[in-house]
Amino acid sequence: MIAIYVLALGLALFLFTRFTIFVGREKNAYLDRIVQSRTQNLRENNRHLHSDLERATKRNAKLITTRDELLNRSLTAEKRLAHSNAELKDANRDLEALSHTLVQDLRAPLIKMQAFAHTLRLPHHSVTERERAEMCAFIAVQCERLTSRVESLLSLSTGSQSDLAWQKVPLTPLIDEVRRHLMTERASHNVIWKLTDPLPIIAGDPPLLRQLFVHIVSNALKFSSDKPTAKIQITASSSSRPDYIDISISDDGIGFDEASATDILKPFHQLNNPNRYPGSGTGLTNAQRIATRHDGSIRATGAPREGVTFVITLPTRPPSIIIT
């Protein structure tokens, strides 16, 4: 009997152990399934979170870009406004100077023309035919002069108001075309040209830039016309301003007193005898205004009988604050 009890007890223990192992395996398998399911859910959630984070990052980047663009536009608008105010002040100052110059320049001939016209209305015996002819000739010359002044004022207005069409402008062919154009009017004028080859590429409105260089080169030709053989040099060098270039145009003409350097660019301000060196007195003024519209400048240096050098500073790319 004892043997049977022992055998039954051993069998019971064996069955209990096997049952315990089976239950443990099933439990572990269940727990593994739960862990795998939760791990998969976590991975899905992480993927969704990562996607949401990427979208949020992109939105944030767009917001930052938009903010920066708005700030840049605001700064650009402020710069444009400041530039416009500066241009307006310059225009008002030029207008005042021009009005004063016109009054001083035109008052005397108008008064004289009025007096001559009154005299010409007198009976024939009061004025000789020679005097009458001289008065008529004076009135005709002054009318031409006044017409030239009006045309010059219109030219100045056009150079100040027309819109700028910014382009890259190779300077060498532009200067060559200007030289050919001006020399056709001065076939008897012997000139030795010395040019930097090649001249740089600048930025600006081609017709206005051509007009600028016509004025400067024409000035050099006119005031060196007394020379048997004139020498004109056109060179280019780096400017102290980034993205700008200095173009120097020098002649060996009659020059001018350095004390008059600030007057040489004023409208209708002719430093030399207008009968010997005829002109409207607005060419250099117009050139300066064109340079200013391109955010550039012109300065002149010289000495009597030693010629003049004009240094024209112009951009190599469109300045960002220019208002066209």
Image: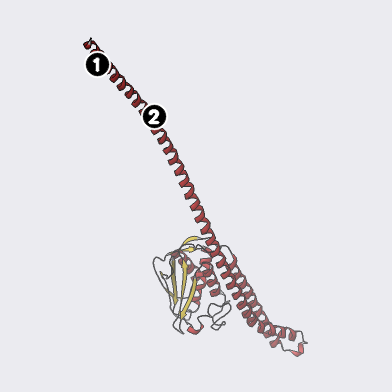
| Camera-side residue of 249 and 64 | 64
Residue 174: give x, y in percent of width and height: 47, 65
| Residue behind mark 1 | 10
Residue 232: give x, y in percent of width and height: 43, 75
Taking the view exactly as shown, the residue that stands out farthest to the front is 1
| Camera-side residue of 34 and 190 | 34
| Residue behind mark 2 | 34
Q: Does residue 262 sit above or below 315 in this rendering?
A: below
Query: Image point 40% across, 32% down: which residue?
Result: 38
Residue 256: give x, y in percent of width and height: 49, 83
Gap in angstroms between the C-alphas marked 1 and 2: 36 Å
Q: In this image, 4 relative to 236: left or right?
A: left
Taking the view exactly as shown, the residue that stands out farthest to the top is 1
Label 1: few (<14), some or many (≥20) within 10 Å?
few
In primary-sequence order, the first of circles 1 and 2 is 1
Taking the view exactly as shown, the residue that stands out farthest to the left is 3
**Which amino acid does the dot numbered 1 rest on?**
Gly
Q: In this image, 301 relative to 11: left or right?
A: right
Q: Is residue 184 visible?
A: no
| Camera-side residue of 35 and 315 | 35
Q: Secondary structure at mark 2?
A: helix
**Which amino acid does the dot numbered 2 rest on?**
Ile
